[in-house]
Image: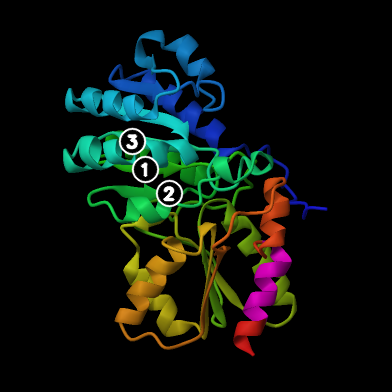
Amino acid sequence: MAEQIIIPAGGDKPNQDVFSETLQRLAATDKNIIAVTSDSRGSGKLVPFGKSFPKQIVEVGIAEQNLVGVAAGLASCDKKVFAVSPACFLTARALEQIKNDICYSDNSATVVGISAGVSYGALGSTHHSLHDFAVLRAINNIIIVAPADNFETVKATELAAESKHPVYLRFGKRVMPSLKEDNSDGFEFGKGRVITEGSDVAIIANGETVYPAVKAAEKLKANGIAATVVSMHTIKPLDTELLMKLAATCKAIVTVEEHSVYGGLGEACASYLLQHGYAKPFKIMGIPDEYTITGPQLDIFKHYGISEEGIADEVTKLLR
């Protein structure tokens, strides 16, 4: 059985739904907001957007390369474009168009990868996006963001609409609990959010792995281990100032992500820290270099240790 994530009262939603709602709010007062989809109107939660703003949505069919090309063209005409498609197809089939048409040309389009990571768990490895951070990190001139809760999703969507440069937003399908009651610390691209504070270990996560990290911190606290949990929502540019602060104050660092252990958040953090003299225990938690087991997302998480128990166990072993 999968670990059951307990959702606090208050009606938190999947980030994909919050993204769509935020886009509708922005489009109501800005006719330059344009959604472009590749047969993803339903899965991208854009049906209400299409009904409310039929002149502000473009459907290209199952044609991700065309999706990105159209988005880049509209962005070059000063439209605020959101190109929406499943992350697994968008960042593989249309990688060349993302590189050349959007990033090289510096068109301010937002590429939106939905149902990311192993959200399509039961559909198998063909539908998993465990490579997108890695391939996009290697492309110059794109901001890469994986919001963790509804607050971060609203703010990331608003900032993407204002951005003068390319942005990649990554969303999963699961209902996401609020990470903090007080969000007065705000949200900026390139600035991680500290969720809990402790000096024994820093757990750095993003997207849908932040909540299991928070639950793991609670479990560790009961065993006398104080953990700082960070939502490192922006992988590029990385918040290196916060990273160095964590390296200086904590005894060990663990990164957690819904991505291959190659080329994602963990390797971004490790690369920076190693080149700046870090020499303490460090562990990257993610999907190993294999085609995953098939099953619901939380079953896959648990299988690979991306769970309250799995993260707590890795931290405990690292601190021995």
Q: Nearer the viewer, residue 32 or 254?
A: 254
Measured along the vertical axis of the image, is residue 313 above or below residue 288? below
Q: Which amino acid is tagged 3?
A: Thr
Residue 92 percent across, percent down from the top left: 41, 41
**Residue range of the region highlighted in magenta in the rendering:** 307-316
Indicate whether residue 312 is drawn in magenta: yes
Q: Which amino acid is tagged 2?
A: Asp
For the question of whether residue 80 can be seen, the reply is: no
Q: Earlier in the sequence, mark 1 or mark 3?
A: 3
Q: Which amino acid is tagged 1?
A: Tyr
Of helix, strand and loop, which one carries label 2? Answer: helix
Q: Nearer the viewer, residue 142 or 10?
A: 142
Of helix, strand and loop, which one carries label 1? Answer: strand
Mark 2: few/some/many CA within 10 Å (<14, 14-19, 20+): many
Q: Residue at x 31, y 49 (%)?
A: 143
Of helix, strand and loop, which one carries label 3? Answer: strand
| Lateral position of residue 81 relative to residue 89, left or right | left
Measured along the vertical axis of the image, is residue 21 above or below residue 258? above
Main secondary structure type of the part rendered in magenta: helix
Residue 298 percent across, percent down from the top left: 70, 51
Q: Which residue is mark 2?
A: 132
Q: Earlier in the sequence, mark 1 or mark 2?
A: 2
**Proximity of marks 1 and 3: CB atoms separated by less than 8 Å:** yes
Number of numbered discs on residues: 3
**Proximity of marks 1 and 2: CB atoms separated by less than 8 Å:** yes
Q: Which residue is mark 3?
A: 110
For the question of whether residue 81 can be seen, the reply is: yes
Q: Nearer the viewer, mark 1 or mark 2?
A: 2
Residue 157 percent across, percent down from the top left: 40, 37
Q: Earlier in the sequence, mark 2 or mark 3?
A: 3
